Image (cartoon, helix red, strand yellow):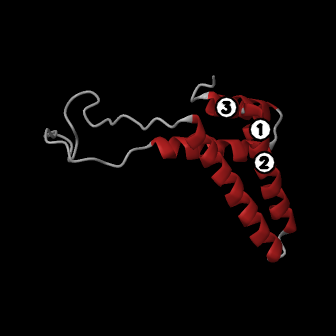
């Protein structure tokens, strides 16, 4: 049985390897995918905190008073987010190709391949 963090952990391991290997395209793709997962876990701002600081405008009083618990993404949601990153890169690559930017399009396709390989390896 897979843990919900398997994909994120796998992406982080691949990121470490890409940094060591100085593969800038893979580093960028993996960082973007991890950031997309982190952003998906963020919650919408809730109601304002009633206890405010007299010293800081809009500040909450107390350690962690303004903190909100993040969403927990299941494995399928994580995979869907990374797949969306892949699709976005492939669509951008096609646009670059149409406008004569074949080297940038190739970089985007390579980064999409990095993410696809991560998805396959984590399943």
User: Residue 52: image x %, image y %?
Assistant: 15, 40
Whole-Å distance between the Cαs marked 3 and 2?
15 Å
Q: Locate the C terminus and report the quarter of the image it occupies.
A: top right
Tell us which disc is closer to us: 2 or 1: 1
Mark 3: give few (<14), some (14-19) or many (20+) Cα within 10 Å: some
Foreground pick, 109 / 122: 122
* Quadrant of the rendered image containing residue 75: top right
Which residue bears the numbered disc 3?
A: 12
Taking the view exactly as shown, the residue that stands out farthest to the front is 1
Q: Is residue 52 left or right of residue 109?
A: left
For marks 2 and 1 on the same chain, the one whose residue lies earlier in the sequence: 2
User: Residue 90: image x %, image y %?
Assistant: 75, 60
Whole-Å distance between the Cαs marked 2 and 1?
19 Å
- Picture residue at 21% right of the left edge, 42% below the top: 56
Whole-Å distance between the Cαs marked 1 and 3?
15 Å
Which residue bears the numbered disc 1?
A: 120
Q: Is residue 36 left or right of residue 110?
A: left
């Amino acid at each position: 049985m897979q843990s919900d963090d398997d994909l994120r952990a796998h992406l982080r391991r691949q990121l470490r390897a890409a940094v060591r290997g100085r593969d800038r395209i893979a580093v960028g793709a993996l960082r973007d995918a991890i950031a997309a997962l982190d952003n998906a876990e963020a919650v919408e701002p809730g109601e304002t905190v009633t206890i405010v600081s007299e010293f800081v405008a809009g500040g909450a009083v107390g350690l962690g008073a303004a903190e909100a618990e993040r969403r927990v993404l299941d494995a399928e949601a994580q995979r869907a987010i990374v797949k969306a990153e892949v699709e976005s890169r492939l669509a951008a690559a096609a646009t670059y190709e149409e406008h004569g930017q074949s080297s940038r399009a190739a970089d985007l396709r390579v980064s999409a391949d990095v993410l696809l390989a991560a998805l396959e390896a984590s399943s």
